[in-house]
Amino acid sequence: MVAPSTDPGWTPLFLKAGAVVMETGGFMSHGAIVAREYGVPAVVNIPGVMKVVKEGCKVVVDGDEGKILLQ
């Protein structure tokens, strides 16, 4: 899931997400906390990611290193 940010209304979407990438937020943001609770890899605070990732693009997310790779 690639999003500008998340809020509690997005929580059900995390159950289907393989990973979460957000333009804004920090390690204590809603998206980061919910991703940790669900065991979903997440990288947050990547300004402009919504403009770079196009529909259908494969995104590899390394939550431990805080990096994403577009393929």
Image: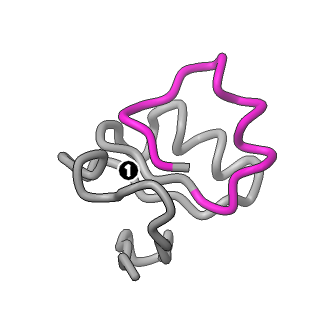
Observer-nearest of 62 and 33: 62
Instruction: State the SS at label 1.
Output: loop
Identify the residue at horizontal 37%, vertical 69% (top origin). 66
* Extent of the magenta region: 2-19
Query: Where residue 3 sits: x, y (%)?
Result: 44, 39
Q: Is 1 part of what is drawn in magenta?
A: no
In which quadrant will I find the C terminus?
Answer: bottom left
Residue drawn at (49%, 77%) of the image? 60
Residue assigned mark 1: 44
Spot occupied by residue 11 in the image (x, y as percentages of width and height): 71, 29
Neighbours of disc 1 within 10 Å: few (<14), some (14-19), many (20+): many
User: Looking at the rendering, which quadrant does residue 12 occupy?
Assistant: top right
Q: Quadrant of residue 18?
A: bottom right
- Residue 71 vs 63, above or below: the answer is below
Q: Vertical placement of 67 versus 42: above or below?
A: below
Position of 5 relative to 42 (above/below): above
Q: Residue at x 19, y 46 (%)?
A: 47
In this rendering, would 13 be left or right of 7?
right
Q: In this view of the protein, which residue sits in the foreground, 25 or 55?
A: 55
Kindly identify the amino acid type of the residue bearing the numbered disc 1.
Val
* Nearer to us in this view, 8 or 16: 16
Q: Residue at x 50, y 62 (%)?
A: 56
> On the rendered structure, is 10 left or right of 54?
right
Could you say where residue 26 lies in the image, as x and y percent from the top left? Answer: 35, 42
The single residue placed furthest to the left in the displayed view is 48
